[in-house]
Amino acid sequence: MASFKEIKSMWTELGMDLEKHDEFLNSFPSVMKEIIATQEHRPQAMEYFTNVVRTVHGQRPYELFEHKKRGGKVFGTYCVYVPDEVLFALGAVTTGLCGGDQFWVPGGEKVLPRATCALIKSSVGSRLDHTSPFCQLADLYIGEATCDGKKKAWEILARDVPMHIMDMPQKKREKDIQRFAEEIWELVEVAENLTGKKLTSDALADSIRLINEKRRALIRLHHTRQSAPAPISGKDALMVTQVAFYDDPSRFARMVNELCDELEERQAQKEGPFPAGTPRIMISGSPMALPNWKLHHLVETSGAVVVCEEQCTGTRYYENLVDESAGDLEGQIMALARRYMKTNCACFHQNEGRMQDIARLADDYRVDAVIDYSLQFCGLYSTESYLVKELLQNKGLPYLHIESDYSQQDSEALRTRIEALIEMLA
Ligand code: BJ8
C-alpha cells in the first residue's frame, strides 16, 4: 500500500492541479458515506471494492505509476468495444477514463457544447482540468467513432493528448465483423509501436484467458441477482462492475469470486439487503461511469431493488466470452472481433440484438419493471427508447423512460416518477 505522502508526490509528478483536485477529494467521502455506506446488510466481501473506490485516485493509480516506472505503458479507454486483450498481451495495462462525476462537467463545457452528454463532458473535463490521475497516467488514449458526441469530442481532446481512434462499423454483417478485425489489427500495430513489443499468439492466448476469467467472475456475480430476494443491492453490484474498468484483472476476478462465495451462501439462506417481494427493476440504456450511482440510489431508497443493468456498466461489459480455441494470431483476432461485435450498443443501425437482450434479461432476472435511462443529449439511447417501450408494452412490462445528467437538480422530480412506478407495482 502506498502512503499518502507517496501518493501526493505522484500527483505532483503527474502534473495534476492539486488545489482543484483537493476540491474533488473533499466532496467524495460524503458522497460515499451518504450513498454507499448507509446501505444495510452489505456483503462483507464488498469491503474490498469499497476501498478501491474510496482510494480511487490513490492506490490503483500508484500501481500504474510504478508499472510505468518499470517501463510499462498505460492505455486509457472510453468504450467497451476496445479489446483490452491485445493491450495486456503487449505487457501494457488499460484503464477506463470515462468521467462519471458532475465535478468535471464544467471543465468539459469550456470546449464542448452544453448540449453534450455528461459522460463526454465529464471525461474531457477531467483531462483538461488535470484532476484525474488516470488521465495523467495514460500514454495513449484510445477513442472510438461511436456516437457523434464522442467522435467530435475526440478531435478536440486529441489537441491535448496522444489519441488513437478505432473506427466502428455501423452494422453487424459478416463483412462488418471482418472490418472490425482490421481495426483490431491496426490497434495492434499502434500498440506494438508504443510498447516496442511484438504481439505473439501465446501472449494473446494468455490475456484472452485472463479477461475471460474476469468476465466469468462477473457473470457468476450477476447471476446471483436472478434469485429472490437478490443477495446484493443494485448499487453494490453496479460498483463492482464500475471497478472492473480500473482494477488489476486477475486480482479483480479473485475478489469477485470471493464475493460470489458469500452471495451464493446468502442465496441458499434466501437472504439479501431487501426483503422478499421487493419490486425488481432492470435499468437499460446509457452507461453509468464511476461514481454515477444517482439512479440506483433513487430506486433503492424508494422501495425497489435494481437486479440487472442492460448497460455498458452491466451486461454489455461482461456477457460473451472470447473463443479460446484459435491457435494463431489470425484466428485469435477474428475471435476477438466476433466477441466484441456481439455487444449491442445503440450506435449500431438495425440493433435488434439489443431488444432481444432486454427481453431475455427481463425474463431471466424476473423483473417487475424496466427503467430505460438515457443521459441527457444522448441521441442514440433516447431515440432507441421508442423501440424499448414498444418491446416492453408487448411484453406487458411496466416501463419508465428517464433522461438525466450528473447534477442533483432533478433528483426530487425523478424520485416522484420512480415512486409512482413502484406504487403501481405493489
Ligand atoms: S458501447 S454505450 S461505452 S459508445 S451516453 S457517450 S453513446 S452520447 S457511452 Fe458508450 Fe461504447 Fe456504446 Fe457503451 Fe455517446 Fe450516449 Fe454519451 Fe455514450
Image: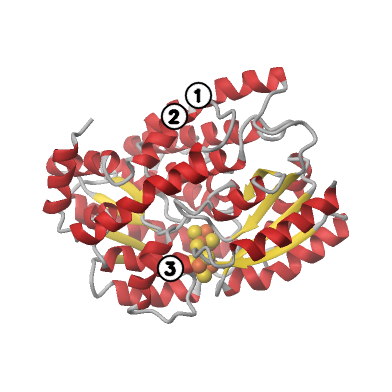
- Front one among 204 and 286: 286
Count residues near mark 1 (Cα–Cα under 10 Å), then give few for <14, some for 14-19, many for 20+.
few
Distance between the alpha carbons at the discs numbered 2 and 1: 6 Å
Q: Nearer the viewer, mark 1 or mark 3?
A: 1
Q: Position of residue 10 (x, y in %)?
A: 15, 47
Q: What's the residue at 67%, 58% (across, down)? A: 415
N-terminal label among 1 and 3: 1
Residue hosting label 3: 120
Mark 3 near ligand 1 (CB under 8 Å)? Answer: yes
User: Is 107 or 382 nearer to us in this picture?
Assistant: 107
Left or right of 33 in this view: 279: right
Q: Name the amino acid type tagged 1.
A: Gln
Q: For the point 33% across and 78% down, which residue is it? A: 110
Above or below for 108 versus 281: below
Q: Position of residue 210 (x, y in %)?
A: 41, 34
Q: Quadrant of residue 375?
A: bottom right
Query: In the figure, is residue 372 to the left or right of 377?
Result: right
Q: Residue 47 carries which label?
A: 2
Q: Give amino acid for label 3.
A: Ile
